[in-house]
Amino acid sequence: MILTFVEHDRGTVNELSFEALTFGRRLAERVGAEHRAVLIGDAGRPLADGLAAYGVATAHLAVDDRLDDYAPAAWGRSVAGLLRTLRPAVVVAAASDRGSEVLAHAAAMLDAPLAANVTEIADASADPAAPWTLIRQRWGGSLLEEARLDAPVKLLTLAPHAVRAEPAPEPGPVALETFAPEFDDGDLAVRVTDRVPASSGKVSLAEAKVVVGGGRGVGGPEGFVALEELAGLLGGAVGCSRVVTSNGWRPHSDQIGQTGTRIAPALYIACGISGATQHIVGCRAAKRILVINTDPEAPILSHADHAIIGDVRTVVPAITAEIRKVLAATGG
């Protein structure tokens, strides 16, 4: 059995979980196993039927009023308890903040190894007791490691955008089975108790189809005005490098990189960004990268599909002006 942890927030599925579900389904088909899923909290109940599209045969739902909002240890305890009952061969979760945290808690509670940021299974056996060979990202994605995972129940997280989410060609029905997990008040010591809504009307950086990123070369906080204008015309979002947040020019929520948001837009326009390793980790899944930089030797150029060597404070307004001309001519 392959079990996929499906992360949701009050009934809204994290997009990375669809990638994990795709990975889990393909793995189940490869080793001839059943694909199941686990959801935490009653808000996940309406999601069960939709999991059929990803080849899930049975969805296990942990039900307890105290699980309705995120509590990492309690969620991990719920998953660990289910694993003791089901004894699946493999457990898959997305390597999102919550997916990684929940599976880490479950692994610690089971005294089991956890392989993080896996990109592929190089060697998988239909025998659940046999060791598997995995490829996973290390050092912030700057290198790939071939690792051997040998455990009765193999826990792993899937690196963001390592696979593209794809529904099953012939989905079947999903059986829903609820269970009451056992945990104590200590597992609720860390939990979500309040929420501050994000600014409305902004495109999410993680989900934007176009991202305009700014680095030190933008010159300062005022330099992001032009980037905001360009992103607005393209229906995109604005991000930044770590040095920008370190200087206080933009909030951490705008940071792209290993310690920020990992993006996968159709187009990433990197403006005045040198391209440190941790930033490349965050944008490497972009379909196309356009770099605007005064330095023709900037490391990020080796990852670019297109490049403009010039000052972003001149180039970006020129691009914006041309886009406005095209939109005016086409009535867009």
Image (tube, grey):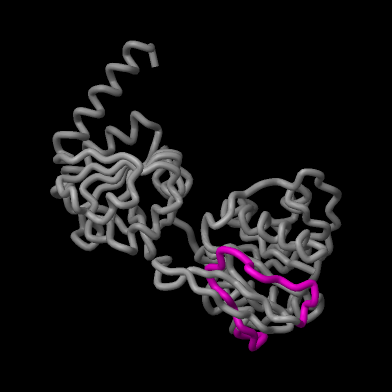
From the viewer's side, name the closer residue of 46 and 218: 218
From the viewer's side, name the closer residue of 121 and 227: 121
Above-or-below relation of 329 to 88:
above
Q: Is residue 17 left or right of residue 258?
A: right
Residue range (magenta): 108-129
From the viewer's side, name the closer residue of 231 and 270: 270
Quarter of the N terminus within the rendering? bottom right
Please name the residue shown 23% across and 42% down the image: 292
Q: Position of residue 47 (x, y in %)?
A: 72, 51
Quarter of the C terminus within the rendering? top left
Q: Is residue 244 left or right of residue 178?
A: left
Asked whether residue 197 appears in the rendered view, the answer is no
Say how many tags the image has: 0
Q: Position of residue 311 (x, y in %)?
A: 14, 40
Q: Position of residue 293 (x, y in %)?
A: 19, 45
Quarter holding residue 70: bottom right
- Outermost residue on the bottom side: it is 111
Please name the residue shown 81% across and 46% down the image: 171
Quarter holding residue 321: top left
Quarter holding residue 316: top left
Q: Is residue 44 left or right of residue 304?
A: right
Q: Is residue 63 left or right of residue 103?
A: right
Please name the residue shown 34% across and 63% down the image: 278
Asked whether residue 278 appears in the rendered view, the answer is yes
Please name the residue shown 60% across and 72% down the image: 134
Q: Position of residue 152 (x, y in %)?
A: 74, 83
Magenta span includes 182: no
Above-or-below relation of 125 to 217:
below
Magenta span includes 124: yes
